[in-house]
Image (tube, rainbow, N blue to C red):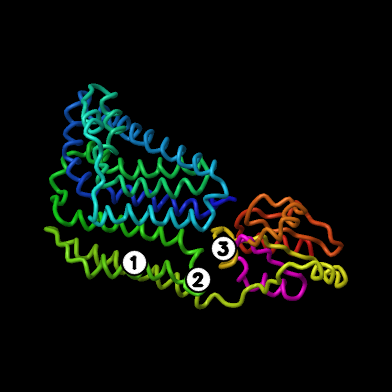
Amino acid sequence: MNRSLSGWATLWTLIGVFAGGLALNLTPCVYPLIPITVSYFSGRSTRGKSGLVGHGVCYIGGLALTNSLLGVVAALTGSLIGALLQSPLVLSVIAAVLVAFALSLFGFWELRVPFWLTKAASTSYSGFFGSFFMGVTLGIVAAPCIGPFVLGLLTWVATLGDPLIGFFIFFTLSLGLGTPLFVLAIFSGQLAKLPKSGEWMNWVRRLMGWILVGMAAYFVQPILPAVSQQYFLGIVAIAAGIHLGWLDKTTATFRLFPWVKTMVGTLCLVFATVVIGNQLFMGPSVRWHPYSKQLLADSAEKQKPVIIDFYANWCAPCRKLDQTTFHQPDIVRLSQDDFIMVKVDLTRKDARKYDHLLEEYDIKGVPTVVFIDAAGNEWTDLRLIDFVESDEFLNRMVSIK
């Protein structure tokens, strides 16, 4: 049962993760490390800019190694659990974990690293290995601020079950976290122009907390009542925007900060408008029939091909197919005129009544969309086991028609 990313979703996810890595530099635990790190690089370099670049690359390499390995391990662990990660109970637990980490970023509790681990991380080494080791241990030193976000991201990556995606997500996070330090190390003279540490960094922590709340909303969405699940993520975005943009009274010594708060709040409200608007104005959808033997018999008499969609509410690609692909006007029109559209809902425990269908069609997970021609034969080369865009699905319908 695949929750992995594909296509444009992967690109936008990596862009978002990189931006998250950049934002983590502004948290109270990381920001004060910037002058220390830059001073460290400058002191270790004996060969001008080339030496600084070498130390910076080693630093980012150490940071990327640690985080990328965490991402791979999380993805492998999730893939071993398999379908368990798709159950409503486990989705609820994942959402609860993400909210718990978000509460840490909101200041309700503090993540503490054991003293012996902090002491080991503060050990200094010389040469390029010293820079590499510094990157490896950054996550330990800054754990009180970045730990909840990283652990929340690990929880999400575990549900994907894709080690390669897990690697790239955390490698990208490392680039976002390490790139500003790398650039400032090379252009250390610009350090004096940075805003001073202050209360505004707690606002950044709360921003990261709201991101985790949004991830929790994404996971819990499928198990909510059908009416509310369509708008839940938008409601969370509205709450985040109002809080971060206007209710939060955090101030800063630099003039740009109020504009940043207003911009973030406005972007959240725009996102909520898009999410809720898409649900309200998405137009008609494919009309599905519940599975029955009589329905398939009737399709044979009418010489109509059949499309069977094996579906579950907790399956993210299934929901995406329903919300986008199956609302495309040409697909809706063709499904009404020339096809028998059958949906097999495997959401609940009573779905065991469909065991014979799962065996007959060799269904390994959801989503699975089966295409059967007018003669009653499946075209296995058209079978879908993941989300596809509307034009690709329409081409498959035209092919079997």
**What number is the disc on residue 225?**
2
| Above or below, 71 relative to 335 | above
Residue bearing mark 1 = 267
Query: Magenta part of the protein: which range?
Result: 325-349
Camera-side mark, 1 or 3: 3
Is 326 inside the magenta-drawn segment? Answer: yes
Left-right relation of 271 to 340 = left
Residue type indicated by callout 2:
Pro
Residue at image coords 38%, 71%: 235
Q: Quadrant of residue 188?
A: top left
In percent of width and height, residue 119 lies at: 21, 30
Asked if labels 1 and 2 touch by Cβ distance under 8 angstroms, the answer is: no
**What number is the disc on residue 313?**
3
- Mark 3 to mark 2: distance in Å? 11 Å
Residue at image coords 60%, 57%: 387
Residue closest to the eye, 291 or 332: 291
Left-right relation of 214 to 27 = right
In percent of width and height, residue 218 lies at: 45, 60
- Mark 1 to mark 3: distance in Å? 29 Å
Picture quarter with the C terminus = bottom right
Residue type indicated by callout 1:
Leu
